Image: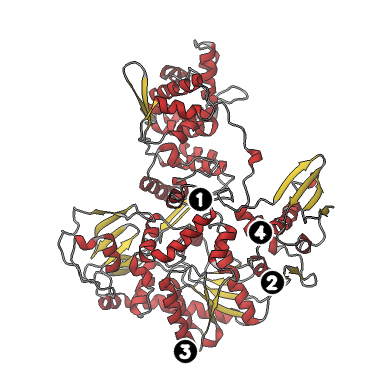
Amino acid sequence: MYAYNFDEETGGILLTDTEAPMSKEPRPVYAEEMNILGFDRRWHYENQNDVPYLWAEASNYFYRGKKIVVVKGGSLYEKPALEFVEEDGLPEGETLLPVNLNKMSEKNFELMENLRQATIKRIYNYWRCMHTRLDCFHVAFSGGKDSVVLLDLVKHALPKASFIVVFGDTRMEFPDTYKIVDAVEKQCKAEGIGFYRAASKMLPEESWKLFGAPSTVLRWCCSVHKAAPQTLKIREILGKPDFVGADFVGVRAQESVKRSGYDVENIGMKQRGQYSHNSILEWGAAEIWLYIFIHNLPINETYKKGNSRAGCLLCPMSSGRADFFRNHAYPNELKKFIDYISANVTDENIYSYITNGGWVNRRNGRDLKNPVTNYREEISGYYFYITVTAPKTDWREWIKTIGEPAFPYEVNEAEDKTVIAKVKAVYDKSPAMKIFKSVFHKAAACVGCGVCESNCRHGAISFKDDLHIDEKKCVHCLQCHNIETGCLAFDSGKLPNEGGIDKMQSLNTFLDHAPKPEWLKEFFANPKLFLENNQLGVMQIAKFKRFLFDAELVDRKNKATTDFTELVKKIGWNTATAWGLILVNLVYNNPQMRWYIENLPVREGITREVVEEKLQAVEVSAKDSKSIVKAFKRLCEIPLGTELNFGTTTSDGKNLSTLKRTKAKLDDGRVILYALYKFAEASDGWYQFNLSRLMSDSDSAGVSPVKIFGIDRDEMQQFLNGLSANYPDFISATFTHDLEKISLVPEKTSQDVLKLFDR
């Protein structure tokens, strides 16, 4: 991947002969997108869409080397705001010139030709090495810019009869994508290249109803509508269920954190048991666009409408601004998917649920009108029981895939078809129990989506008339169980385990004795002496110790100070950084602090009476609600308030009148990183999420640092980018092509983050 600069002469981009450590993923900007955003109200330009005028890197727009606009915000129904660069920008009223594509292509031709020839050689050498060992080669075509370039490279590298092209039709693609697919299919057939379309037997309106809308965690859509149909289509073409093939895939390392870890050649990364060649893995977006312009390849019109990637119309991995452009370009098509969500969830405020990311952050079937309710587990006496009422498929078929079970079991079936499986409770935690449960997950929820069938390379699973497992073909490889919870429909529709949720602890943890500044000063001056010899009253020290316990400054068991106490002293106990860490601990350990965070919105003053009413609505007594309100004022007077800016209060001269949580004054990203790991650890070890989920964590056991510190979206993104650059061993964050991906390292912990403060 070459580095590049913006070229003032051509208005294009100019590669350099140095390698770039990372790409900002530039993309051309056409008049249609400029009109949508409102550029035409500031500058003059011809309203044509054959040649671009600008280039964009994420939210920054450039004209002939100058940054002229920064785009901020935007959501499904909200237009992004424009922030014009005044200093060194472009004066209002100027006439914009289109990019000189011929000159740009000429200036970049030599470097691009070297890259082209090297890539073609790599593709050919891979095919020559592997073609006698594999059953087929196919190009995975999506209709996007990367797959258009990849297909052209493969065409020039390989004999036309040596590969096929397969378009994975999700039936959820942009309308403009189908136009380019039609054109490429016609061209391939004219050249004697096999071109096939692979689609699930389920229509989106069926699958979204059966599974619920896909989310950042429940991404059943990729398996059901893309991966499985392509595998099944190639089996159909070859007439061979156990084929071993290689697919040429247009993934690039710069597109996402996950893809940056790919190798050019691998096996099993895309499809189990299949080979992949990521031919353009090391290309950047600059090279992709230059190749398209130099070789006059077709461009998906969706890019000209502000969409930086071609994919599914409504994707949980996209950002708010991407949703705006999609909705503007294809409002009728997008509305169908919004209606699918609306029709299948119970949330009364459906507008908020959709626009604020409720559907994006869904983790289970709790929000669905038709969740999986026919499956139940329980331990009674010495036995573990699984009960499935009204099963969707026959457990007797699925049990065949296990072979000889690792433990004895008993299954009874009632007249109403209810199935009850019985196993000794001692086996509940055994590894084999996971597969055993999977059998009954499938029995309870299977909708015949085709994923299990595609995972089975031996052709043992059939849904032609009804589910049938061919015992002669089944080798008990368990690949049909190598799916989340064993069944995507079950996983997406399962209800959360309410049995593990504790009843609400008492909210009034401090009574009328919230900590005072002088107590903290004395404690940090000499913690051991303070704990052994202080002058506080009995209730004062009891409640202050509760504060210290929950802040993790004193160990609850041995009543001694902790390593965290020493760290806070080293950082500076009265600094915003130290109190940022303390606040995170308090939120996870103290129900009163968590209540403040979750019920007092940032920047919005609330009267004392309203706060007390909110508390009494959750069965807090009138007396305790007054104490909790008073405690907030005390907390604002310690460094939590004075240094970190936790909140403020006002009084009417005599009594406290309003409470307001305020945005934290925090500039140390390590505090955010600590909060992110706490968030992941509290959320069942969920170490991957997107920014939308952090902005709306209502379905999480953890509390987002956005909510804890009152940070807005842009500032949070800046923190994440900085952390990703400075602490790659802990976090990777990607915000390209309107995709948001935040990945923590599962091997690290929040305690490991604290060690960063010792450096």
Would you call the spot at circle 4 few (<14 residues within 10 Å), some (14-19), or many (20 or more)?
many
| Left or right of 300 in this view: 64 | left
Q: Amino acid at mark 4?
A: Cys
Where is residue 570, by image quadrant?
top left
Would you call the spot at circle 3 few (<14 residues within 10 Å), some (14-19), or many (20 or more)?
few
| Image vertical order of residue 181 relative to residue 491, above or below | below
Work out how far the residue at label 2 is from the one at label 1, CA to CA, in angstroms. 33 Å
Q: Could you tell me if the residues under marks 4 and 1 are in contact, i.e. CB atoms within 8 Å?
A: no
At horizontal 55% and vertical 61% (from top left) the residue drawn is 208
| Image vertical order of residue 12 relative to residue 81, above or below | below
Q: Which mark is residue 457?
A: 2
Q: Position of residue 606 (x, y in %)?
A: 38, 30
At horizontal 34% and vertical 54% (from top left) the residue drawn is 78
Q: Secondary structure at mark 1?
A: loop
Q: Which residue in the structure is indicated by mark 4?
A: 487
At horizontal 45% and vertical 80% (from top left) the residue drawn is 182
Q: Which residue in the structure is indicated by mark 1?
A: 361
Work out how far the residue at label 3 is from the one at label 1, CA to CA, in angstroms. 45 Å
Q: Nearer the viewer, residue 706 or 63?
A: 706
Q: Which mark is residue 190?
A: 3
Quarter of the figure that contains the N terminus: bottom left
Q: Amino acid at mark 2?
A: Arg
Work out how far the residue at label 3 is from the one at label 2, CA to CA, in angstroms. 33 Å
Q: Secondary structure at mark 3?
A: helix
Q: Amino acid at mark 1?
A: Asn
Q: Could you tell me if the residues under marks 3 and 1 are in contact, i.e. CB atoms within 8 Å?
A: no
Q: Nearer the viewer, mark 4 or mark 2?
A: 4
Q: Position of residue 67 (x, y in %)?
A: 25, 58
